[in-house]
Amino acid sequence: MIPLISLNSLFSTMLFLLLLNNLLLLGAPGLRALIRLTAFQGILLGVLLFGMEHALLACAVLGIKGLLLPGLLERTRRRLGAADEPRPRMHLGVCVVTGILGLVFSLWLETRLPILPDLFPPLLLPTALTTLFCGLILVVGRATAISQVIGYLVAENGIFLLGMPLMAAGAIWFELALLLDIFVAVFVMGNAIGHIGETFDSLDTGRFRSLRD
């Protein structure tokens, strides 16, 4: 009984840390902080999977989401010499409040959705939906290409959490293939952002609209 209680306690703690990490992402002012929090989110996902006895997938998540992708983003940031978000489209305080409202909505939605009993452990569904919302807020509220890529990664982490209760032996290989696709996509985007940064003075995606031949 004691190991089971400890496992449930670890699971709940990881979900609470994920929720806190989401709000910190929304309020983070600089790209360096965003990248570090994204790496921490990947580590938390890996620990969750270890707790669900998916060791192979946990190692892949730790390696790709916790190390490789943040490392690639940090390398791109250093290559461009970018440190801060120049002008976020949404005030950081508004982003955090919107994220909290997303959490409240997720908690309410959990009580309304007709899902199978015991399919989702407590707090997993609200955490997954809140992570998805926070990723979308980052995509909409931030201006630079790097921070928007981070937003897509956070949103994908939310979708990943939604799929955790449905993991079986075959699904794990599907998740591994998906992780590899995401890694390739971010690798390509990181290189594209690097070339854009070397060619133009700004990574503000709003200024890309003014580009002409």
Image (spheres, grey):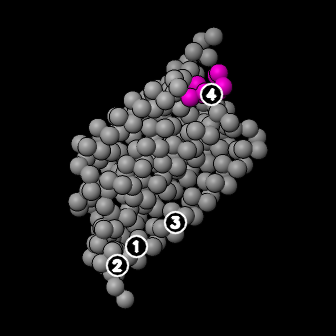
- The tag earlier along the polypeptide, 3 or 1, is 3
Q: Are marks 2 and 3 in contact (CB under 8 Å)?
A: no
**Residue in the image at 42% along x and 55% along y:** 150
The residue lying toward the viewer, choosing from 88 and 68, is 88
Q: Residues within 10 Å of mark 3 (few under 14, many from 20)?
A: some
Residue type for callout 2 = Glu
The residue pinned by badge 4 equals: 115
Residue type for callout 4 = Ile
Residue type for callout 3 = Phe
**Is 78 situated left or right of 115 in this image?**
left
The residue pinned by badge 3 equals: 187
Q: Quadrant of the N terminus?
A: top right
**Residue in the image at 58% along x and 47% along y:** 61
The picture places residue 27, in percent across and down from the top left corner, at: 28, 44
Q: Residues within 10 Å of mark 2 (few under 14, many from 20)?
A: few
Q: Quadrant of the C terminus?
A: bottom left
On residue 198, the disc is 2
Alpha carbon separation for disc pair 3 and 4: 36 Å
Alpha carbon separation for disc pair 4 and 2: 49 Å
Tell me the SS state at disc 2: helix
Tell me the SS state at disc 4: loop
Q: Residue furthest right?
A: 170
On residue 194, the disc is 1
Residue type for callout 1 = Gly
- The tag earlier along the polypeptide, 2 or 3, is 3
On residue 38, the disc is none
Alpha carbon separation for disc pair 1 and 4: 44 Å
Is residue 213 magenta-colored?
no
